[in-house]
Image: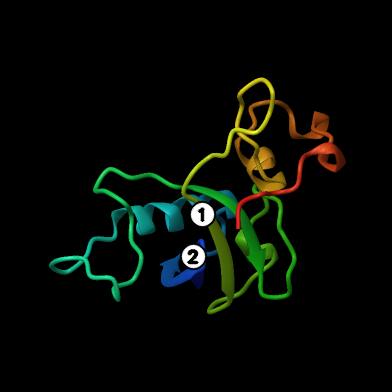
Amino acid sequence: MKVKAIIKVNDNEIEYEIPCGFGDKTFKWLAMVASQRFSLSSPNGAIRSRDDIRGVTDRSQHLPSDIYLENGDMPHPSCLLSDFIKDGDKVFIHLSLTQPIVSTSGTPNKSKWETLAFTTRDNNSIDIDNIAEDNID
């Protein structure tokens, strides 16, 4: 199965075709692979203002903040790809260039998807309704 991953960074979009095997991978895996592809993309020669947006440096890493299907659904990070998409489907992945620190404790404000994907607590103990809305566009 190959998935068309549309990477959204700020107002820019880049499309990658990502081979996913038999679809036995998770959406978290897909988001991390797409993030790595974006980070490792390098310009052919000098970067000009008309060139596509790319990773800021050779060592840049970007965190996936949201992932959406073509119908607008946001799948859980641990769901299998084959349960929701088929060969050639598009998946929209938002990458955050920065982690805005807005809480009084100095921790970054995470989207619901980021919280589910990257929190080490048991996902059943996370109160999704009380997670702050994503401020990264």
- Can residue 1 be seen by looking at this rendering? no
Q: In this view of the protein, which residue sits in the foreground, 111 or 118?
A: 111
- Can residue 88 be seen by looking at this rendering? yes
Q: Do the residues labelled 1 and 2 touch (CB within 8 Å)?
A: yes
Residue at 60%, 58% (x, y): give it.
Answer: 137
Asked which colour scheme the image uses, the reply is rainbow
Q: In this view of the protein, which residue sits in the foreground, 57 or 63?
A: 57
29 up-or-down from 92: above or below: above
Q: How many marks?
A: 2
* Dot 1 alpha-carbon crowd within 10 angstroms: few under 14, some 14 to 19, many 20 or more: many
In the image as oriented, which residue stretches furthest toward the left? 45
Identity of the amino acid at label 2?
Ile
**Residue wearing tag 1:** 95
Residue 61 figure quarter: top left
Residue at 56%, 58% (x, y): give it.
Answer: 94
128 up-or-down from 55: above or below: above
Q: How far apart are marks 1 and 2 (CA)?
A: 7 Å
Disc number for residue 7: 2
Residue 81 point in image, percent of width and height: 61, 61
